[in-house]
Amino acid sequence: MPAEEKNKVIYISHPSGSSAEIALYGATVTSWKVDGTERLFVSKQAIRDGSKAIRGGIPLVFPIFGTKENIQLPQHGFARNSYWEYVGLINDNDDVSVRFTLKDTQLDQKLRNGWPHSFRLTYTVTLTAKSIKTVLGLKNEDEDTFEFNTLLHTYFHAPNIADVSVDGLKSLSFIDKVANGAKDSESRDQVTVSAEVDRIYCNVPDKLQVNFGKDSSIAIEKTGLKDTVVWNPWTDKAKAMGDFGDDEYHNMVCVEVGSVADWVKLGGGQSWTGGQTLTVL
Ligand code: BG6
């Protein structure tokens, strides 16, 4: 059975043995297994009752990143904490693809007032033997242009953060949120994590790689998305989050592809698409 809906979670499996789970709440991918190994991190303290965005997996950030002074929306917008509609299985050949949609009319009035635009988001998750592809489509159903940010907030499971490195960011400019938004440029071939890190790397080439030690790596290939955030809350921020274990920062790293440094403008009636393919190497 390639796709099954149970308790508002869609389970998909591939003949090779890979599998994934997607919660209708946020259309959040909460599990991706290849060769029997879980590749995504979800906190043991994640709240799964639909009252808060799920702490882990691949939450979708839209239409704002962080908070914005003049936009009355929760941090990271509403896509990750709204129930999406499950459209269904969209093909059933070698790959297994499922699709979800979110329209402005599905949001409560407060959120619609916070971002008063007509839109349709379409999210397609495709599983192959070694990869998962997550692609977001957006249609502006207004006559006027609107602007948005979006991000695939991927939490990778890491056996040990000391062994994690990210390739492909050398020489890029970044905004350091830990240093009050100071701008800097990356000097390292491999970005490692040994303290709190919260950086927006700007105008990032489409191919990155996250290494987890012991010959274990995941390639990230993005399309239509300019930036990449690298985030690990480390000790103090971990303790401050109610839905994250104090020590769990040892076992995760977020490498999040998106367009967040600048607004993306989308004309009335126009469509946009962006996404990523994660492949176990
Ligand atoms: C990252 C941001 O994308 O998300 C961080 O860069 C933020 O600043 C993190 O802390 C988690 O955000 P939230 O809202 O899920 O706690």
Image: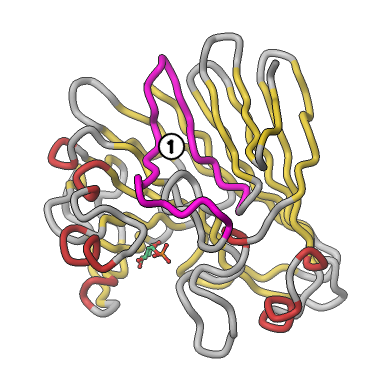
Secondary-structure class at tag 1: strand
Tell how many labels. Answer: 1
Please state the extent of the stretch shown in magenta in the rendering.
26-50
Establish if 46 lies above or below 281.
below
Q: Is residue 66 above or below residue 91?
A: below
Instruction: Please tell me which residue lies in front, 166 or 178.
Output: 178
- Where is residue 183 drawn, in percent x and y? 27, 73
Q: Quadrant of residue 144?
A: bottom right
- Three-letter amino acid code of the residue under disc 1: Ile
| Left or right relative to 224: residue 139 | right
Q: Could you tell me residue 119's position as x and y percent?
A: 78, 65
Quadrant in which the N terminus is drawn: top right
Q: What is the x, y in percent for residue 52?
A: 51, 62
Residue sitting at 62 percent across and 48 percent down?
27
Ligand 1 found in image quarter: bottom left
Task: Name the residue rendered at 51%, 51% in the picture.
Answer: 48
12 w.r.t. 227: above or below? above
- Mark 1 highlights which residue? 220
Quadrant of the rendered image containing residue 164: top left
- Image quarter hosting the C terminus: top left
Local crowd size for mark 1, using a 10 Å CA cut-off: few (<14), some (14–19), many (≥20):
many
| Residue placed most toward the observer, 178 or 238 | 238
Instruction: Indicate whether residue 43 is drawn in magenta.
Output: yes
**Residue 237 or residue 180, whichever sits in front:** 237
* Residue 268 in magenta stretch: no
Going 56% across and 47% down the picture, which residue do you hit?
28
